Amino acid sequence: MTTLNEQWEERLAALWAELDMLDAQTFIARIDAMAAELPSNAAIGLFERGGARDSCGFTELAIPLYKAALENGLTGLRRRRANIQMASSIRYLGNPQTAVDILTAEMQVGSDELDGAVHGFLALALADLGREREALAISLTALAAYLPRYNRSLARYAQSLVEKAIDG
C-alpha cells in the first residue's frame, strides 16, 4: 500500500520531470502548491521551493529557502543537496569563499552518491578563488573513483598537485 508521503513524493518527482516543459512561473507555482500541502515550516517544502526557484533562474530567491530548510531540520540526501545547491548559488552570485566553506564542511559529513557533486562544485569555487591546482586535484580525485583502472595512480598524482601548490 502506498502511503500519503510516498504519493506526495511520486507527484513531486512527476512535476520535476516536467520542468523543461513548463514556464518558470507555472513550475514555481505548482511546486509552491505542493509545498503548501505540508506544514508551513516543513523543511522538505522549503527545500523544494528553493530548488524550483534555483532551477528557474531565480537564484537569489533560492538561498534563503535553502537556509530555512536546513534550519528547520532538513535531513538525508535533501540536506546534502541543499548544501550543494546553496553553495553553488552563493558562488554564482559572487561569493566563492562561502561556497568553499560550505562544501568543505560537507565533505567532512560523510560519503554518498553526491560526493562527485560536492567535489565538482568545490572545484568551481576554488577556481574562482584562483586556486586552480587545488581545484584540478579535487576534480581528478573525484574522477579517479569512477575509473576501472589507474584510479590509484590518478589519485596519487592529484594529491601531488595539492602538495606542490602548498610547497610552491
Image (cartoon, rainbow, N blue to C red):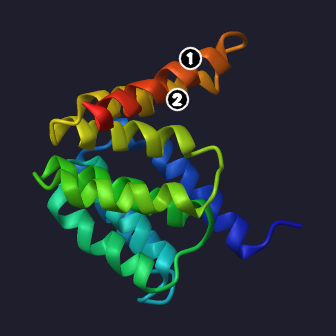
Q: Residue at x 26, y 41 (%)?
A: 126
Residue pointed to by mark 2: 141
Residue 30: x percent and y percent? 38, 62
Query: Is 48 in front, or is 155?
Result: 155
Query: Is 40 in front, or is 54?
Result: 54
Secondary element at image label 2: helix
Q: Earlier in the sequence, mark 2 or mark 1?
A: 2
The amino acid on which the numbered mark 1 sits, given as a three-letter code, is Leu
User: Dots 2 and 1: beta carbons under 8 Å?
Assistant: yes
Image-based side of 153 in relation to 6, left or right: left
Per the model, the C-alpha gap separating discs 2 and 1 is 7 Å
Split into 4 quadrants, where in the image is the N terminus?
bottom right
Q: Residue at x 35, y 36 (%)?
A: 20
Q: Residues within 10 Å of mark 2 (few under 14, many from 20)?
A: many
Secondary element at image label 1: helix
Q: Residue at x 62, y 15 (%)?
A: 153
Q: Residue at x 15, y 36 (%)?
A: 130
In the rendered view, would you say 138 is above or below 93?
above
In the rendered view, would you say 160 is above or below 38?
above
Query: Is 118 in front, or is 56?
Result: 118
Name which quarter of the figure residue 105 lies in: bottom left
Residue 63 is tagged as none
Residue pointed to by mark 1: 154
The amino acid on which the numbered mark 2 sits, given as a three-letter code, is Thr
